[in-house]
């Protein structure tokens, strides 16, 4: 059984989920919903870019295949312009993207389907 997600912080941490599949978003929201985290969601790269211009989340969970492009291409931009935002890259069909994502600055990689403990470990590690 997975440990509950606990984050050592006195202020809420902000997580941006960039994912276009509604079921994945729902699962992420259910698993990450808690007092220590504030979750926001967009479903494409354009909306993620607009969000980042206003708010810099502590962590971004970024899917690779999005309606308007590839998260792997957006990753370099995020790391260059928002270096304090930690990025968890996700992919379900492009497992070979792992090495490219990590080389391009992703702080963590989750291969879909992932389990609750993998998600919690990635978020806990990047926020603590």
Image: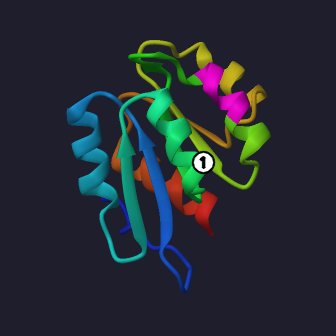
Residue closest to the far bottom:
10
Give percent across and percent down for residue 112.
Answer: 39, 28
Q: To which quarter of the image does residue 124 belong? A: bottom right
Q: What secondary structure is found at the residue carrying circle 1?
A: helix
Q: Quadrant of the C terminus?
A: bottom right
Q: Residue at x 49, y 63 (%)?
A: 14
Name above or below for residue 80 compared with residue 59. above
Q: Which residue is mark 1?
A: 53
Q: Residue at x 70, y 19 (%)?
A: 100
Q: Quadrant of the N terminus?
A: bottom left
Provide the residue span drawn in magenta.
Answer: 72-77
Could you say which is closer to the camera, residue 113 or residue 104? Answer: 104
Give percent across and percent down for residue 38.
Answer: 40, 66
Give percent across and percent down for residue 111.
Answer: 47, 28
Could you say which is closer to the camera, residue 112 or residue 58? Answer: 58
Give percent across and percent down for residue 6.
Answer: 45, 73
Q: Residue at x 48, y 76 (%)?
A: 12
Could you say which is closer to the camera, residue 37 or residue 107? Answer: 37
Q: Is residue 75 left or right of residue 110?
A: right
Could you say which is closer to the camera, residue 42 or residue 8? Answer: 42
């Amino acid at each position: 059984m997975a440990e509950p997600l606990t984050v050592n912080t006195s202020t809420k941490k902000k997580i941006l989920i960039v994912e276009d599949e509604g079921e994945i978003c729902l699962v992420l929201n259910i698993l990450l919903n808690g007092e220590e985290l504030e979750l926001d969601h967009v479903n494409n790269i354009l909306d993620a870019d607009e969000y980042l211009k206003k708010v810099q989340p502590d962590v971004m969970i970024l899917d690779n295949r999005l309606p308007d492009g590839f998260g792997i291409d957006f990753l370099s931009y995020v790391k260059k312009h928002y270096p304090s935002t930690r990025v968890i890259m996700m992919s379900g069909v492009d497992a070979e993207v792992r090495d490219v994502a990590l080389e391009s600055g992703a702080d963590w990689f989750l291969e879909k389907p992932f389990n609750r403990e993998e998600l919690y470990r990635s978020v806990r590690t990047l926020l603590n």
